[in-house]
Image (cartoon, helix red, strand yellow):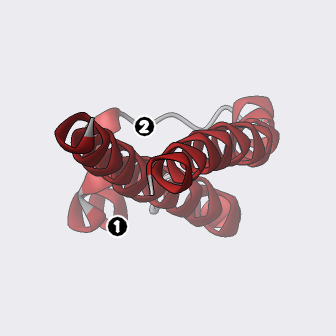
Amino acid sequence: MYILLISIVIGLFVAMLFLNLYFRMKVLRTYRVLVKNRVEFGARHLFDKEKMEAEVMPKYPHMREEIETFVNHIRYSMKMATVLTALITLFGAILMYYR
C-alpha cells in the first residue's frame, strides 16, 4: 500500500511538471503573437469575462481568437495545477498518516 501511494504521488508530480511545460509552451506561443500585435490587457481581464468583452475586445477585434485562446490556456492551466496540487497534498497526507 505504501509503495502504491508513493508511486501515485510521484506520478502526480511528474504529471504536474509535464502539464506545466506543455501549457507554458502553448501560452508562450500565443503570448508572442499578442506581443507582436501590441495587444495589452491586465490580469483582472483574464478572470473577468465581462471586463474583457467591454474593454479589450473592442480595441483588438482582429485578435479576438488569439486573446481567447491565451485566456483559456491560462485558466485551464491554473485549474489543472490546483487540482494536481490538491491531489499531491491529499496523497502526501495519507502517506504521513500510514507511516
Between 76 and 51, the one nearer to me in the picture: 76
Residue at x 66% of width, y 36% of height: 17
The circle on residue 41 is: 2
Looking at the rendered structure, the kind of residue marked 1 is Glu
Between 44 and 1, the one nearer to me in the picture: 1
64 is higher (above) or lower (below) than 73: below
Residue at x 34% of width, y 58% of height: 52
Residue 24, picture quadrant = top right
Residue 8, how many percent across, how many down? 54, 53
Looking at the rendered structure, the kind of residue marked 2 is Phe
Residue 20, how many percent across, how many down? 64, 39
Between 47 and 89, the one nearer to me in the picture: 89
Q: Report whether 53 appears left or right of 39.
A: left
Between 27 and 66, the one nearer to me in the picture: 27
The circle on residue 53 is: 1
Alpha carbon separation for disc pair 1 and 2: 11 Å
Residue at x 34% of width, y 67% of height: 53
Tell me the quarter of the image containing the N terminus.
bottom left
Q: Residue furthest left?
A: 97
Residue at x 51% of width, y 34% of height: 40
